[in-house]
Image (cartoon, grey):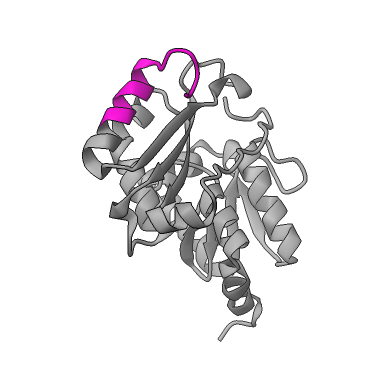
């Protein structure tokens, strides 16, 4: 789904998101290999579809996910790209996950 | 002491520039794909904006995360208000919400 073997940070974040938000769709992609940090778990892209996001602004949704990822961000996760949708928004966009921009090398 | 100064410096930038971007690298040479994506969106909208390179100042790099309780960079501010990071800016661009936001930001100071 998102690479061969999820690392410890990815697994921990996955469990926290499931517990807190009960997402209908949850995909965590480890995009670290595309970046210059040379850390195995530096860049994640999280796509979530959850009822819990209903009536919440984008900033509120991102804050919720960032708060759940606090420990992982402190433990070496450097970039967390978040795509958070309600079930109806997800359906409207045909279940397409946005692409991340290419690295520009300054993330050391 | 230094923390307080950094907070004031950030506040000054955010309140004195209607569209203010904290990014990695500069407008010409972004050093992060997420920062570059936000610059691209802003340029596409033709909105005047100021950018601060957080790689040039460790205090601001850390301080900006505290300022809006937001753990990542880039961060965009419009009219003194925190808008979001790369994902939010791109999403608001796609949905058309940014047009409204910049329409008010382009008008002269009230």
**Is residue B9 among what the camera can see?**
no
Q: Determine whether, in the image, residue A76 is placed left or right of residue A17.
A: right
Q: Determine whether, in the image, residue A97 is placed left or right of residue B48.
A: left
**Is residue B41 among what the camera can see?**
yes
Q: Residue furthest right?
A: B28
**Vertical arrangement, residue B95 with respect to residue A78, above or below:** below
Q: Nearer the viewer, residue A53 or B48?
A: A53
Q: Nearer the viewer, residue A44 or A49?
A: A49
Q: Residue at x 72, y 65 (%)?
A: B45
Residue B72: x, y in percent? 47, 41
Q: Residue furthest bottom?
A: B110
Query: In the figure, residue A36 lies in which quadrant?
Result: top right
Q: Residue at x 22, y 36 (%)?
A: A19
Q: Residue at x 72, y 49 (%)?
A: B27
Q: Which residues are magenta?
A: A1-15
* Magenta span contains residue A8: yes
Q: Determine whether, in the image, residue B83 is placed left or right of residue B102.
A: left
Residue B54: x, y in percent? 57, 42
Residue B41: x, y in percent? 68, 56
Q: Residue furthest top?
A: A5
**Vertical arrangement, residue A97 with respect to residue A33, above or below:** below
The C terminus of chain B, quarter of image: bottom right
Q: How many marks?
A: 0
Query: In the figure, residue B57 lies in which quadrant?
Result: top right
Q: Residue at x 33, y 29 (%)?
A: A14
Residue B64: x, y in percent? 45, 48
């Amino acid at each position: 789904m998102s690479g061969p073997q999820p690392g410890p940070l990815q697994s921990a974040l996955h469990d926290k998101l499931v517990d807190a938000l009960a997402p209908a769709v949850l995909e965590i992609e480890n995009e670290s290999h595309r970046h210059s940090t040379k850390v195995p778990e530096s860049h994640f892209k999280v796509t979530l579809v959850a009822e819990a996001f209903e009536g919440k602004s984008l900033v509120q949704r991102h804050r919720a996910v960032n708060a759940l990822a606090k420990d992982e961000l402190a433990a070496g996760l450097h970039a967390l790209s978040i795509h958070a949708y309600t079930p109806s928004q997800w359906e409207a966009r045909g279940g397409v996950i946005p692409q991340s921009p290419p690295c520009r090398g300054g993330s050391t | 002491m230094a923390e307080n100064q950094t907070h004031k410096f950030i506040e000054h930038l955010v309140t004195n520039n209607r569209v203010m971007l904290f990014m990695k690298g500069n407008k010409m040479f972004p050093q992060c794909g997420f920062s570059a994506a936000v610059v691209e969106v802003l340029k596409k909208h033709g909105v005047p904006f100021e950018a601060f390179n957080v790689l040039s100042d460790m205090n601001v790099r850390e301080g900006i995360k505290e300022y809006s309780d937001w753990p990542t960079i880039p961060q965009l501010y419009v009219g003194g208000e925190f808008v979001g990071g790369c994902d939010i800016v791109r999403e608001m661009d796609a949905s058309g919400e940014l047009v409204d936001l910049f329409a008010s930001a382009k008008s002269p100071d009230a």
